[in-house]
Image (tube, coloured by chain):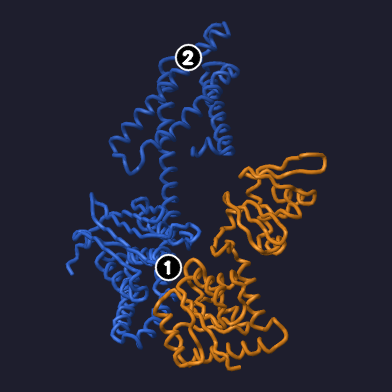
Amino acid sequence: MHPILSDRRRFLVYLIAWMMTGVLIARLLVAADLTNWSFALLFSLPLALFGSFLTSSAYFVCRSLPFNRRSFSLAALVFASAALISGLSWLGLCYGWNRVLVLASDDVEVLHLSSHLLVLFFITGFAVYLLALLAFDVYIAFDNIREAERREAASRLLARDAELQVLRSQIDPHFLFNSLNSISALTAIDANAARTMTIALADFFRQTLAIAEKEKISLKDELRLCENFLAVEKIRFGKKLDTEFEVTEEAESALIPPMILQPLLENAIKHGIRNLPKGGLIRVTIFQREGWLHIAVENPVSADPGNSTGNGLGLVNLRQRFFALYGEQARVSWQRGDEKFTLEMALPFEPNNQTQ
Amino acid sequence: MNKRLQVLIVDDEELARRLSLEYLRAHPDLDVIGECETGLEAVDAINRLNPDLVLLDIQMPQLSGLDVLELTGRRSGVIFTTAYDQYALKAFDLHAVDYLLKPYSQQRFDEALGKARKLLIQETSASSPTSSSTQALETLLAQQSEKLQRLLIRDRGQVHVVPLDSIDYVEAQDDYILIHAAGKSYMKTQSLSELEAQLDAGKFVRVHRSFLVQVTAVQSIEKTSKDSQVAILKSGAQVAVSRAGNERLRALLS
């Protein structure tokens, strides 16, 4: 958005300022005893109008050179040549407009454009344009700072929401109470299984507490968390739940935000496996390629769309969380096929340099 | 009153069902006549077997325990089991319906059974058909349907879940209604006024004595003669609109 042309009030003020400049030029011409008032105004006002439009174009020159992609020499070159072109066109116009007026008035030359005066016009056109370029540059810089601040505030907010969500998912009451109920049932049926489940549940909760405070964890840690989670869920759902992990060794060392995979598995069970009488297989594929970490989760879903539970809010949240953490640098997409749900995400691959 | 009570267990988790079975062993006067893994199975079993008592899990995929009650019309002889459901619990606390919070003890289980048994005796002996627990369940289901996003329709042993958004219009027939949604129509035994009361008045308008339309499904209203008009729906269907209905519809469309 052009800061002047897109705002009616600013545009008006800008035009008035230029008209006053036109009057000033006329005043100077008269004071130098070069011409009379009426011709001076006739000469300078249309030129000022043209000048106002010419100068406002400086904004686009600034915009074409984003700060993060410009070198000093390039900026100097572009600015200088833009100002040069402006000075020349200003000069040409002064000269041409004077000729037109002289021809139209069919009179002797009212304003004699001496070479001194022409040089003066050129310098004015050059300098004014250069000033405009610098002014717009400063304006854009301020605008960028404001925008960055706004983005940062928004992302901080999102990050906090995400944190809250992490905390909330740690204590998903359904998961906890249902698991405890399963343990209660197992004590009479299979005491060993009851013990295994208690330990897996405890490990899972301990891990969520440990990683929730961290900004990034290694994929290996996240996978361990998922293992404990699945150990609990496999006892709850029995043969219905089957999982398959395919993770390359180099991907395992990647750093990722905590709890991005576990909620996906939870979703796959809640909205997929649980709705199917025979259950199914959740397949997780993780690999690294060309600087990206690719994560895919695939699970069967009921073919009847009326049976789908949930509204994808969890997935939208995940996408927002990614945006807060990575900006445009990460991607989450999902699609629901006839009997299959696939979720794919890609995030910048960050190797874990710490030796552990 | 020495009749053996028949019990149905409904829970989607096997271990949870086994726990109930284990606790029930202490009650030799009860017969477990079935176990259901899904709400659909439960609807079928309740209709077929008409058990005296149903141990009903609330959170189940596809059809929740409350959906099962809505579909079967069952209002008594229910003990809810749930891991956590703030909404339902609040409703239960206000009324006489019993519920078991997972995980629960044998003692708590026995108490709930004792209470249910007492209620069953009251109901069979009392002349009034509506006991306090029946009323409690009615209230609960009414509250539940206030936040309703879908309609449950049972049709010849099949259960259809119809999202409210997909409904074009509903047509009243003799003693049932026809729900037209996404190119299909479903039959439900309910009166049009009853359904209208359950639905959002800002989205569904009674345009005629026998028609209820979803506002967003309406394409245009056209006059067919001096005093009558029809609403043309986006699906191409035409629905008669009365004069009063026309005013209501236009008020919402504008």
Q: What color is chain A drawn in?
A: blue
Tags 1 and 2 touching, CB below 8 Å: no
Q: x, y percentage for residue A64?
A: 38, 35
Point 67% across, 58% down: residue = B177
Q: x, y percentage for residue A253?
A: 21, 62
Q: x, y percentage for residue B54?
A: 53, 80
Point 43% across, 69% down: residue = A164
> Observer-nearest residue: A311 or B242?
B242
Residue A43 drawn above or below residue A283: above
| Chain drawn in orange | B
Q: Mark 1 lies on which chain?
A: A
Q: Which residue in the structure is indicated by mark 1? A: A165
Q: Which numbered disc, 1 or 2, marks the residue that appears first in the sequence?
A: 2
- Residue A130 shows in this picture: yes
Secondary structure at numbered mark 2:
helix
Q: Mark 2 lies on which chain?
A: A
Q: Which amino acid does label 2 sit on?
A: Gly
Residue B74, label in figure: none
Between tags 1 and 2, which lies in front?
A: 1
Q: What residue type is labelled 1?
A: Gln
> Observer-nearest residue: A90 or A119?
A90
Q: x, y percentage for residue B193?
A: 72, 62
Secondary structure at numbered mark 1:
helix
Residue sitting farthest toward the right: B226
Q: Which residue in the structure is indicated by mark 2? A: A96
